[in-house]
Image: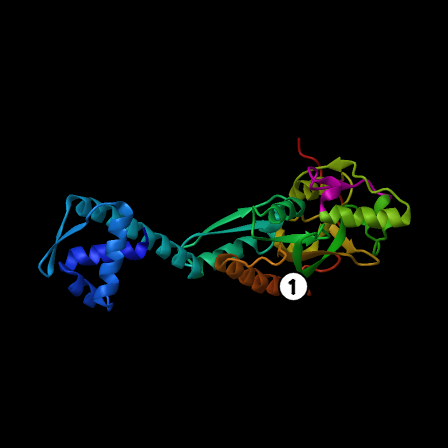
Amino acid sequence: MTLQQLRYLIAAFEHGSFSAAAEALYLSQPSLSEQVRRLEGELGVELFHRVGRGLVPTVAGITLRDHAVSVLAAVEEARESVSAVRELRGGTATFGTWGTARYYPGTEIVADFRERYPGVRVRIVGQNSTEVVAMVRSGELEAGMIALPIDDRGLEVRPMMDDELVFASARPEHLRGPVTIEDVASHPLVLSESTWGAEDPTRRQLVEQAQRAGVDVDPEIDVEDIEAALELVSLGHGATIVARGMLHGLGDRVPENLGWVPFAEPFYDTFAFIHRRGARLSPASQAFLDLAEVRLDALARTLQASPPRRRAAKGPRPHRR
């Protein structure tokens, strides 16, 4: 039984004869009637009584017609749903990002996407680049935006933006000039991403530099959220490493007494798009990546001037009890 045969069956019902049905479908009458005969042979019943040049449906024919209408309607619904996804009129765009992407243009990307494609739902997942990489590699996600370095086995990686990391403290004596990794190791550190630890790309870079210099950069205070780290540093509990893009995203939520300086040998969070090697992205995922690229380009240009690469510290804030 084929969809074509079901369409011919319904046409024969609607037009009352094979010849009229064939004409309506721009077919030859023998072709249409032959397909109906094959369907009858497969089912082992007559679907029509041939009366002169007309057709009278049998009970079996009427029963099958009702199912045929439902089947063809379901097929058309399936076809339309796929067309809606292809044309970005429906479906869901699922995308992976690191947890603090909300401080970057993450929400703006979603807003841009929804403005252009209001019929497409958006699902953003991921708490850290390491998690997003695992989800993309397993096929749970089509694509993601992550910070390098990562394990890129089986993945296409397209770097998009460099975000300079700075050394932040509330103590002016910590910020007399650009710092070295040895300087960083000499201060008590407050670092975010405690769940991921050394798997976090920023921490991995920091640890790699420290290992080459033969120093230790284990944090004395380990927290999940960068805002918590900055708050603790503003109270005088050590220093931290933070990206300028994060400072830009936080805006006036950055404690006023906090200052920062660049590294003597600058290093960066490099953001990149990833997807499985050789995989073709869905229209929704591709459109999301295109909008993300525009937003990251704009942010990169902004970070050339603001926030500044260094800012003076004003001393720790008193702790409120």
In the figure, is residue 216 to the left or right of 237?
A: right
Query: Measuring 64% from the left and 64% from the top, which residue is drawn there?
Result: 302
**Closest to the observer, 318 or 204:** 204
Q: Is residue 22 magenta?
A: no
Please provide percent x and percent y for residue 117.
Answer: 43, 59
| Disc 1 residue type (three-letter) | Ala
Segment colored magenta: 186-200
For disc 1, the neighbor class at 10 Å (few under 14, some 14 to 19, many from 20) is some
Main secondary structure found in the magenta portion: loop
**Closest to the observer, 141 or 104:** 141
Please provide percent x and percent y for residue 132.
Answer: 62, 47
Q: Quadrant of residue 177?
A: bottom right
Is 303 placed above or below 189 here? below
In the figure, is residue 225 to the left or right of 182?
A: left
Is 106 placed above or below 306 here? above
Please provide percent x and percent y for residue 18.
Answer: 17, 61
